[in-house]
Amino acid sequence: MFISEAYAQTAAGGDPASAVFMQMLPLILIVVVFYFFLIRPQQQARKRHMDMIANLKRGDVVVTSGGMIGKIKSLQDDEVRLELAPNVDVRVMRGTIAELRSKTDPAPANDSKPE
């Protein structure tokens, strides 16, 4: 009764598409943040790991995901033979190799040779 028709019409007006966009904006921002801070770095790390595994060569010193350090004696499609100590060889899956240490294994500083 006391509200004029012009005032009621402008209060109810508005673009429904912009209202839907404003409601979806927080969800879109969350997805973007998750992509750049979680998903993308994980994909890049996986790609670097796959490249490292593909480029392994005989004589490389590697660390397995179980923590064993050994020198590669032979490579097969999905399997690697590691020498952990003289006359101690183990077979591990390529995917379990976590880190490439070096081409040669330097002697630890705390080991002393008996004289």
Image (tube, grey):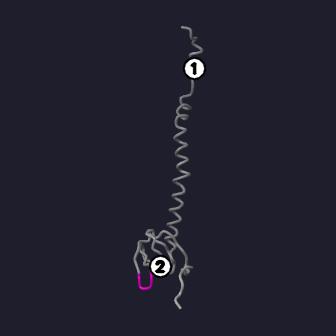
Q: Secondary structure at mark 1?
A: helix
Q: Residues within 10 Å of mark 2 (few under 14, many from 20)?
A: many
Kind of residue indicated by mark 1: Ala
Query: Of marks 2 and 1, which one's residue comes earlier in the chain?
Result: 1
Query: Of discs 2 and 1, which sits in the foreground?
Result: 2
Q: Which mark is residue 11?
A: 1
Kind of residue indicated by mark 2: Ile
Q: How far across and down, in percent of the image, does residue 99 sit?
A: 51, 70
Residue hosting label 2: 72
Q: Quadrant of residue 25?
A: top right
Which residue lies at the image location 54% right of the left edge and 55% below the top edge? 40
CA separation, marks 2 and 1?
75 Å
Q: Is residue 87 magenta?
A: yes
Look at the magenta stretch and give its main secondary structure: strand
Q: How far across and down, in percent of the image, does residue 67 sit?
A: 45, 71
Which residue lies at the image location 44% right of the left edge and 79% below the top edge? 84
Q: Which residues are magenta?
A: 84-88
Q: Which residue is situated farthest in the left direction here? A: 91
Task: Please tell me which residue lies in front, 105 or 55.
Answer: 105
Total marks shown come to: 2
- The answer to whether mark 2 and mark 1 are in CB contact below 8 A is no
